[in-house]
Amino acid sequence: MNLVDRQSALETLKSGLPIIFPTDTLPAIGCLPEFSNVIYKFKKRDKNKPLILMGSEQKQLIDYVHESAREDYENIASTYWPGALTIVIPCSEKRQVILTSKDSTLGLRIPNSNMAQALIKKTGPLLTSSANISGFKGSMTAMGIASDFPSLKILGPIPWKKNSGKASTIISWRKRGDWRMIREGEVIVRDLH
């Protein structure tokens, strides 16, 4: 198993490779935004499925949010983050170069995981997906993930803190004050309209 600390993880990410790290929900595979293609390659993921941009704190992600949705973003984010909620929101025009969606939206999340937050604080926001081969259930442990992705670096130390094993709830912004439920997950979001 290729265990790395945060500094080595940053060097790996800067070289264009993804790393595996724990979150509060499922283990993640993440890369710097300019290298998003590597996640699709390693996971064998359909290019039509967008990735999620994870941050360590709200202010790290605000520049990615289109100004028309910023107030609603701040209200929802301050209520549910850090936590298992992914917010799909229109992307700021100046940040659209990192988009993996076809509709100018971006999924944002701040995981409730000290390890993930410490990593992302050092690296900056990371484009992420669950650490599994697409179409297959992934392992919850670093050891199991290492067998699926033997060439990738894994953030240590291990064992990781136990995660929920459930996917995040996903909501999408439609217009001011109006959100739509995309996927029910661990977090229960009230008052979407």
Image (tube, rainbow, N blue to C red):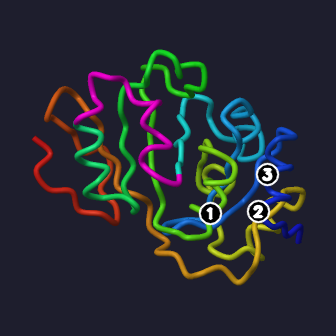
74 relative to 143 in the view: left or right: left
Q: Residue at x 51, y 17 (%)?
A: 94
Q: Amino acid at mark 1?
A: Ala
- The residue to which callout 3 is attached is 10
- The residue to which callout 1 is attached is 118
Image quadrant of residue 39? Answer: top right
Could you say where residue 109 lies in the image, as x and y percent from the top left? 45, 50
18 over 98 or under it: above or below: below
Could you say where residue 139 lies in the image, as x and y percent from the top left? 65, 71
154 over 71 or under it: above or below: below
Q: Nearer the viewer, residue 67 or 172?
A: 67
- Badge 1: few (under 14), some or many (20 or more) residues near its Cα, within 10 Å? some
Q: Amino acid at mark 2?
A: Arg
Residue numbers of the magenta segment: 56-71
Q: Nearer the viewer, residue 19 or 135?
A: 19
Q: Are marks 3 and 2 in contact (CB under 8 Å)?
A: yes
